[in-house]
Image (spheres, grey):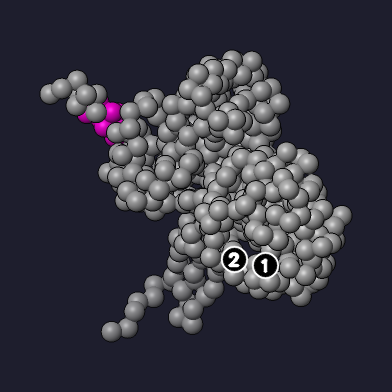
Amino acid sequence: MTSAERINDDAIGLMHRIGDAARHASRALAQASTAQKNLALTEAAKALRESSNAVVAANARDIAAAKAADRPASFIDRLMLDDKRVAAIANGLDDIARLPDPVGTVLAEWTQPNGLHFQRVRVPLGTIGIIYESRPNVTADAGALCLKAGNAAILRGGSESHHSSVAIHACLVAGLKAAQLPETAIQLVPTTDRAAVGEMLKGLNGAIDVIVPRGGKSLVQRVQDEARVPVFAHLEGICHIYVDRAADLAIAVPVVLNAKLRRTGVCGAAECLLVDKNAATDLLTPVVIALLDAGCEVRGDAATQRVDQRVKPAAANDYGFEFLDKVIAVKVVDGVDGAIDHIARYGSQHTDAIITGDEATAERFLDRVDSAIVLVNASTQFADGGEFGFGAEIGIATGKMHARGPVGVEQLTSFKYKVRGTGQIRPA
């Protein structure tokens, strides 16, 4: 056996031990009280605040390695932690603790004519596997959401954020200990061996119930192609914002700028601006100039290029492309139906928005755009579980089975039927 084969076998064995531990922990979590889970979360938040300097120092090691590897600015932004971001992560843990506990909620109940009483009740999914890359906050968000929903979590962060994730995970474990819950309820995979990912995608002999990938297109594509368990994910965030003829310029300019430029590296960043051809004079020009003046590269069609000499010609593949940078594609379309058709062709069913003062047009857009999140007169950057009141999110799902949109605590549960009788038997 070669040394590479031995390392691979070691990683496989490690992952199956992690899976077995998660399976046992999930049983304890399914029976944990709301008070216990909330204590674990608030104590983890407290540990994170007390360890802020250590977490930032660990993150600095990851940042230094990323810069040495000449990673792009958008990557560095996703990876970077400072005191403010660490505090926000800790606040997110407290927010999740304050959420209603979904486990045990009765979704529906009824009694059949034969006297059988039925209840549909929320229950945890079991064990969630999360595979992510350069966002160390995912360690806290995913672990906390899984815990609140009564699930065990197996976290496999990327090598790029390894030191940051280890420091954050230690705070989560401190919270579990304080609440007398199994430390293996939230496990961080200690190896960066790719074989670990492969074993997770196989389900670890039934230990993993759902996989959630958070990262670039290649990671998500691999997970969707290879996973043998259900996947909550989106492949890309090709988000559009459409400025209608009935839009208020005072709303359109700041909303478009925020949608594109607040944080360019997030999946809810607008990648394409569509403008009604009947608003080309009054709306297209000021919106495009505002983007250019803010330092955004604009790639547009012929009508957009006539607005300003700084506009670059849009290539065919600029539409439907996730830039994740200060770049936006712009196109003039034939009204709301033209926008809907463009989004259907080039979008990724993630998040799309319309700016309009016409209620009928807004409703048409809301009803006909088949995306997980559709907004009116608001930035696409609200595509975030925290902004939905979910406390945080484990990811955005664009599929149509089980979970869609931000995946919060409710989406991390399933249900079972509790049926109570008084001796009923089914007739032959």
Tag 1's secondary structure?
strand
* First reached walking from the N terminus: tag 2 or tag 1: 1
Residue 236 at what x, y percent from top left? 51, 50
Report whether 140 appears left or right of 425: right
Indicate the amino acid at tag 2: His
Q: Quadrant of residue 108?
A: bottom right
Q: Nearer the viewer, residue 74 or 101?
A: 74
Q: Is residue 343 left or right of residue 155?
A: right
- Asked if marks 2 and 1 touch (Cβ < 8 Å), the reply is yes
Q: Position of residue 5 (x, y in %)?
A: 19, 26
Question: What secondary structure is found at the residue carrying circle 2?
Answer: helix
Q: Check disc 2: other Cα within 10 Å, few if <14, some if 14-19, many if 20+.
A: some
> Is 10 part of what is drawn in magenta?
yes
Query: Disc number at residue 243?
Result: none
Q: Residue at x 61, y 19 (%)?
A: 56
Q: Which residue is mark 1?
A: 333
Magenta segment includes 184? no
Quarter of the image where the N terminus is located: top left
Which amino acid lies under the numbered mark 1 shown in the image of this protein?
Val
The residue under the point 52% across, 75% down is 111
User: Is residue 194 placed above or below 377 in the rendered structure?
Assistant: above
Where residue 342 is drawn, which disc sits there? Answer: 2
Residue 55 in sight here: yes
Toward the viewer: 349 or 402?
A: 349
177 or 344, which is in the foreground?
Answer: 344
What is the span of residues highlighted in magenta in the rendered image?
9-17
Residue for point 37% across, 45% down: 222
Relative image position of residue 173 (x, y in whole percent):
51, 26
